[in-house]
Image: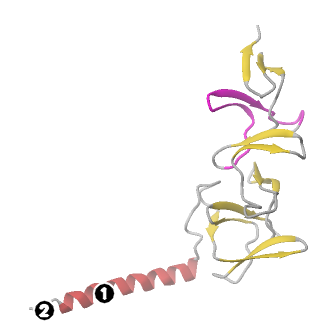
Amino acid sequence: MSDRPRFYRANAIHLAAAMLLSVWFAAFGTHILVSYAHTKDESIYISGNWVKDEAGWRYFNQWNSKYPAGQWIEYQGNSYYFKDNGYMATGWHYLNNHWYYFNPEEGSTQGAMVTGWIHDSHYNSTFYTNQIGIMVTGWHKIDANWYYFNPGPDGIAGQMAVSRVIEGSYVNADGKMNEEIE
């Protein structure tokens, strides 16, 4: 008995599965793949070309012949946000009730969401964004040290406190909690 019918049946199943996936991606796009860089359900993955004009950078998505607008995208391991006008965000942006920082420096990672420590020369201050890119406020333990980040209205939100007493604890010039004041 020949294995030929089983071979053809297996190839037919693989071909049908590939066609089904092709139809799925054509109908629903690649937005079903999620990113954990900021929030689970916001990202799309793209393929195409960067385009720069006098207003800034945009990304032409070859999958749907459009520029992403008002959405997160993933590109070469980085998360980017494209504003409603289709241009890449840089600097601080308030999205979905959170502050995010996007690299403003020209170069290969311009516009990429930044996580971790940020020294913002515009504010001459230090900030911190967590592993999903959200600016932290209040007390946070980072690398075994406690730091305090301004929660709001009495100054710059997220700005790290330095050389002062916060809620009975002193933070030194590096922003680290040094000792509790009685």
Q: Which amino acid does label 2 sit on?
A: Ser
Residue ID at (72%, 66%) = 71
Residue 7 falls inside the magenta stretch: no
Residue ID at (81%, 62%) = 106
Q: Which of 86 and 122 is in front in this view?
A: 122
* Left or right: 62 in relation to 151: left
The label on residue 2 is: 2
Q: Which of marks 2 and 1 is nearer the N terminus?
A: 2
> Residue 128, located in which quarter of the rendered image?
top right
Q: What residue type is labelled 1?
A: Asn
Where the N terminus falls, by quadrant? bottom left
* Crowdedness near tag 2: few (<14), some (14–19) or many (≥20) residues, C-alpha within 10 Å: few
Confirm whether residue 128 shows in the render.
Answer: yes
* Left or right: 50 in relation to 8: right
Rounded to the nearest angstrom, the CA distance separating label 2 from label 1 is: 16 Å
Q: Where is residue 169 in the image (x, y as percent from the top left)?
A: 76, 17
- Please determine whether, in this image, residue 81 is positioned above or below residue 69: above
Q: Where is residue 79 in the image (x, y as percent from the top left)?
A: 67, 60
Q: Position of residue 60 (x, y in %)?
A: 73, 78
Q: Residue at label 1?
A: 11
**SS category of the residue bearing label 1:** helix
- Quick one: which residue is furthest to the front in this view? 107
Q: Which of 93 and 153 is in front in this view?
A: 93
The segment highlighted magenta reads 133-155
